[in-house]
């Protein structure tokens, strides 16, 4: 894109705010947080959940990938890291990532080859090798890696994607780990065995469930204590008498965060399992997991499959696009965000569906975004409609304003954009009572007044809501208007008075509109509407009338939308 990004929130103005709000200092000096900001960010991101869809089990979301044998090696990069070939206690069989070795690093693994059908699944999976008569190692036929959003909690708490470089070990404890035969039900305790059974003419199958409750650490000294199994109806997961033990509904207070429940299902080309044992001398398997996924894809699948409560068939390169929003998976372009005006809490959505959250502002401030320091990244702005004060911040973080000034009259609506094509955004205003746009191509400072606008012009009807974008890709932002009562969208390709250059209907009455270059990133900005009734964004990829080209479920009905480029 040849120009910096600049967007404005276009929802109805917030209600009146009290006259006692301090103008010169934003509220962060007044707030004390009982929880650290890092943990708070996890919990905020987890709280923004998708609306339910039908599933085989109430609330269940699940996807799976098919992988194969990669290699045998007596190494373990989690327990025994070191130079290449540093020996571990026993032989392991590795699946998925083909480069796993004792010397492996996250940065090398994430770009390495995988033998999974989904090339984004570059994670490392391994278990002790299966050993048969005569000490012959047995190579797996295939491995299925299941990811689900269990435990499904009554609170609706969302699942958090594994962070990059996350590691854990599932202990060899029945029934977290068990054996059965191909064709046996995976959902009854009766078909589970603590030792490899004789399967007759069927193949042997190993299952290992990993913990799905987390304390926030990437790893722990024993690679187990940072994760925990959950509970169901007050009893420990997998305890005697607990049927359907994988259906847990609570995490312990020591491990309050939900991560995907990973399950390995490995098929071996042997039938009489009673003749076989594992390379560590046991008959019940532990297992290792190292998250070296393509992180954007993992986060998108967590958000759009697990938290959306969708149950999928195998996901592979050929059908990945059927389950992921183009908005979240597209390279480059703008992203949407939401602001809770009652708290000054911002949620910015990134590629892959990850959500970054922080506080900025006080209740009643009108939020918008722009590139104030010309670095190519959009950051928050606030307009205090009671007095015309502007507060701008140069990073997407909690803190006080970097730039403060006043411009316009109480009740004006802020417009953020690059109105002269110099690569920097400024703050202009739309005065609803006059249907007039006032444009100024500089920012104020030091709590002073900005002065008169460079120029102004009439456009639209009273009650229309303004938005800003580069609708023809010429590097200059212009103003559009959205008639919320009918869904009419119209704009001009120059900042001059006149009739609309383009108009069409998009969305429903009451929708709140923003504009950005998304989905098909081509330099032209197009609309998206946020529908408060169902907390869904609907995107259009061309400036033409028609149905939405994409949609994402995000946020809550009282949020106000913004759009911009949150990273370079």
Image: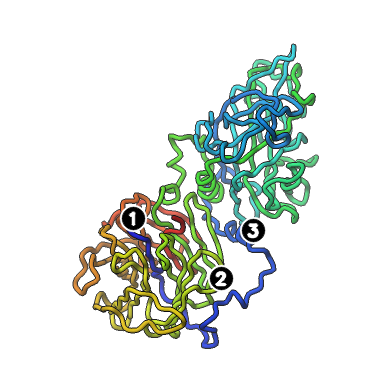
**In terms of secondary structure, where does tag 1 sit?**
loop
**In terms of secondary structure, where does tag 3 sit?**
loop
Q: Earlier in the sequence, mark 1 or mark 2?
A: 2
- Tell me the quadrant of the picture where the N terminus can be found: bottom left
Whether pointer 1 and pointer 2 mark residues with C-beta atoms closer than 8 Å, the reply is no
Residue 351 vs residue 482, the one in the foreground: 351
Residue 426 place in picture, x, y as percent: 37, 71
Q: Residues within 10 Å of mark 1 (few under 14, many from 20)?
A: many
Residue 184 place in picture, x, y as percent: 65, 27
> Which residue carries the number 2 mark?
399
> Which residue is outermost to the front?
83
Q: Could you tell whether 380 is left or right of 220 in the image?
A: left
Residue 407 place in picture, x, y as percent: 38, 82
Q: Could you tell whether 60 is left or right of 568 in the image?
A: right
> Which residue is outermost to the left?
498
Question: Alpha carbon of mark 3 to alpha carbon of mark 2: how far?
Answer: 31 Å
For residue 155, the mark is 3
For residue 540, the mark is 1
Whether pointer 3 and pointer 1 mark residues with C-beta atoms closer than 8 Å, the reply is no
- Indicate whether 431 appears above or below 291: below
For residue 102, the mark is none
Q: Residues within 10 Å of mark 2 (few under 14, many from 20)?
A: some
- Tell me the quadrant of the picture where the C terminus can be found: bottom left
| Residue drawn at x 61%, y 24% as measured from the top left | 71
Q: Could you tell whether 292 is left or right of 222 in the image?
A: left
Q: Earlier in the sequence, mark 3 or mark 1?
A: 3
Q: Which of labels 1 and 2 is toward the front? A: 2
Number of disc labels? 3
Question: Alpha carbon of mark 3 to alpha carbon of mark 1: how far?
Answer: 34 Å
* Color theme of the render: rainbow
| Residue drawn at x 77%, y 36% as measured from the top left | 173
Residue 39 place in picture, x, y as percent: 65, 59
């Amino acid at each position: 894109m040849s120009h910096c990004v600049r967007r404005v929130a276009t929802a109805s103005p917030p209600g009146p705010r009290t006259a006692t709000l301090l103008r010169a200092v934003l509220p962060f000096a007044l707030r004390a947080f009982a929880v650290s900001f890092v943990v708070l960010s996890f919990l905020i991101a987890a709280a923004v959940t998708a609306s339910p869809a039908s599933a085989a089990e109430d609330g269940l979301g699940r996807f799976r990938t098919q992988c194969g044998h990669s290699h045998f090696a007596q190494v373990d990069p989690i327990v025994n890291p070191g130079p290449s070939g540093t020996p571990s206690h026993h032989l392991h069989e590795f699946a998925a990532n083909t480069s796993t070795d004792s010397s492996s690093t996250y940065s090398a693994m994430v770009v390495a080859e995988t033998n999974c059908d989904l090339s984004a699944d570059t994670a490392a999976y391994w278990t002790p090798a299966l050993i048969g008569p005569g000490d012959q190692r047995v190579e797996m036929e295939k491995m299925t890696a299941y990811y689900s959003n269990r435990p499904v909690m009554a609170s609706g708490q969302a699942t958090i994607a594994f962070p990059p470089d996350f590691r854990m070990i599932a202990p060899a404890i029945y029934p977290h780990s068990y054996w059965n035969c191909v064709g046996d039900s995976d959902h009854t305790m009766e078909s589970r065995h603590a030792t490899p059974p004789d399967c007759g003419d069927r193949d042997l199958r190993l299952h290992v469930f990993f913990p799905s409750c987390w304390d926030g650490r990437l790893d722990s000294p024993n690679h187990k204590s940072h994760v925990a199994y959950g509970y169901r109806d007050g009893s420990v997961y997998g305890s005697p008498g607990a049927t359907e033990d994988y259906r847990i509904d609570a995490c312990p207070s020591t491990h309050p965060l939900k991560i995907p429940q990973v399950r390995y299902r490995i098929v071996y080309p042997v039938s009489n399992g009673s003749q076989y044992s594992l390379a560590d001398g046991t008959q019940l398997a532990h297992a290792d997991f190292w998250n070296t996924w393509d992180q954007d894809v993992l986060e998108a699948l967590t958000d759009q499959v697990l938290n959306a409560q969708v149950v999928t068939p195998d996901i592979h390169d050929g059908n990945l696009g059927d389950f992921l929003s183009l908005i979240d998976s597209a390279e480059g372009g703008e992203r949407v965000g939401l602001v809770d005006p009652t708290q000054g809490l911002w949620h910015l959505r990134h590629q892959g569906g990850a959500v970054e959250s922080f506080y900025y502002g006080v209740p009643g401030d009108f939020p918008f975004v722009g590139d104030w320091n010309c670095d190519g990244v959009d950051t928050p702005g606030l307009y205090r409609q009671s007095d015309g004060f502007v507060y701008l911040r140069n990073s997407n973080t909690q803190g006080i304003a970097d730039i403060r000034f006043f411009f316009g009259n109480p009740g004006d609506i802020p417009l953020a954009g690059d109105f002269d094509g110099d690569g920097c955004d400024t703050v202009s205003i739309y005065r609803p009572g006059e249907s007039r746009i006032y444009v100024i191509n500089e920012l104020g400072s030091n709590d002073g007044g900005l002065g008169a606008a460079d120029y102004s012009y009439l456009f639209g009807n009273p009650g229309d809501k303004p938005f800003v974008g580069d609708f023809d890709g010429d590097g200059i932002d212009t103003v559009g208007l959205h008639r919320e009562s009918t869904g009419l969208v119209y704009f001009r390709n120059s900042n001059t008075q006149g009739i609309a250059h383009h108009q069409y209907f998009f969305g429903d009455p009451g929708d709140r509109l923003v504009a950005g270059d998304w989905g098909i990133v081509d330099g032209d900005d197009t609309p998206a509407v946020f529908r408060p009734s169902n907390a869904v964004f609907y995107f259009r990829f061309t400036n033409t009338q028609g149905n939405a080209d994409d949609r994402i479920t995000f946020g809550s009905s009282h949020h106000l939308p913004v759009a911009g480029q949150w990273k370079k």
